[in-house]
Image (cartoon, rainbow, N blue to C red):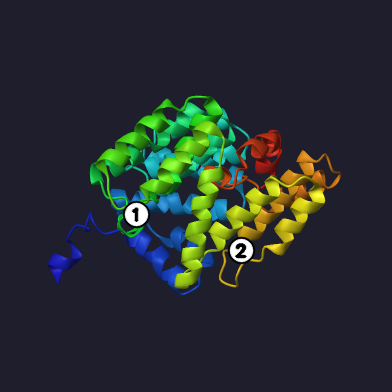
Amino acid sequence: MLSKLFSKPDPDRDRIDELASRLSEAGKLDRLEIELLRKNTRGLTARERESWHHLYGICAFRRGEHQLALERFQHGLEACQYSPLIRFSLAQEYIFLGEPAQAFKLFDLCRFPGISSQYALAMSRYAYLFSEYARGIKYIQPLIDTYLNLKILDDNFLFMRALPFFSETWAYLAVHGKLSGQLELLTEITTTVRRTCCDYDFARLELELEAVLTGSHARLAAHIAERSAEARQAGWPAEYLEATLAVWDAQAAGSYEQAAGILTSWQPGPDAPPWLDDVRLLAKAQAAHRCERPEAERLAAEFFLRQPQLFEPSHALNFRFVEYQEVLKPRLPLVLCAN
């Protein structure tokens, strides 16, 4: 009994994270802040102390209290000076408070695998939003190196290792390269992946690269239409593929009415992700902008209410929204600060 009383805490156990998990499973995550304040932080391990400070800041972040979250993360970084997790969250608060320069100084010190792969993509997305394209590539380079080391690009294989699908990371790289006018790295990585990796639809990858380099999507559209038909025949979900083709058809329409008709006629299935409706909305806004229609402003404002950070680079590339989202970017500082 005495040995249990005076034994040292297990450095590999995180009781704070366990607390958050229990509350989440019980549907009582709103009590997390109260439970954290009840804890005596002096008895925590270094790992638990990091979790405590991070979750304490997250509580304010989830309420939209960004100034309070900023202060909590600042205090947390003072207590856990080498925590990439807290550093990332502090940087994110600077984004929402309209100080991207401060944010990127901190993001530059975060690197996968010190932060999760999703945080690495998030940093690259912020870099995209503020046209910091070299940074955007730098933030995802460790992910690309990981793919090349693993050599297996199967989606399930990557998912089990908490890695984003290769297609998503490749699209981020493509957008940063396209907008910076530097596509040499994209071509080089695509060639290397094609030569050294396996378990991937390399035929589509080559067509995607062709579309980025030439601006012509004709062969890629035919490939997607074929894959969509195969998916429907096999009983697999094909909403994303069908949405892609509908948006591309609308972009080629000769009038706003024709484009709106194409987009309205496409109907996602009941199991389709709800954000596909946001894709339809942005495509209508894009068509209205292209045709200089008065609906353009209203539709764009409605889209920002749903997607205040625009679409991530992968969706922007796949639905050919990259150029139009550049038109919308000047609104971002006000939109982000309002959210």
Q: Residue at x 54, y 57 (%)?
A: 241
Q: Which mark is residue 61?
A: none
x, y percentage for residue 326? 65, 34
The answer to which quarter of the image holds residue 2 is bottom left
The one of 186 and 61 positioned closer to us in this rendering: 186
134 relative to 142, above or below: above
Asked if labels 2 and 1 touch by Cβ distance under 8 angstroms, the answer is no
Report the residue marked by disc 2: 274
Q: Secondary structure at mark 2?
A: loop
Q: Which mark is residue 162?
A: 1
x, y percentage for residue 103? 52, 33
Please tell me how crowded label 1 is: few (under 14), some (14-19), or many (20+) other residues with Cα within 10 Å: few
**Quarter placement of the N terminus:** bottom left
x, y percentage for residue 45? 28, 52
80 relative to 134, above or below: below
Residue 295 lies left or right of residue 328; in this view the side is: right
Please state which amino acid type lies under the numbered disc 2.
Pro
Please tell me how crowded label 2 is: few (under 14), some (14-19), or many (20+) other residues with Cα within 10 Å: few
Closer mark to the observer between disc 1 and disc 2: 2
The one of 171 and 250 positioned closer to us in this rendering: 250
As drawn, the residue found furthest toward the right would be 294
The one of 49 and 192 positioned closer to us in this rendering: 192
Please state which amino acid type lies under the numbered disc 1.
Ala
Q: Residue at x 41, y 44 (%)?
A: 205
Q: CA distance from mark 1 to mark 2?
A: 24 Å
x, y percentage for residue 32? 48, 63
Q: Secondary structure at mark 1?
A: loop
246 relative to 335, above or below: below
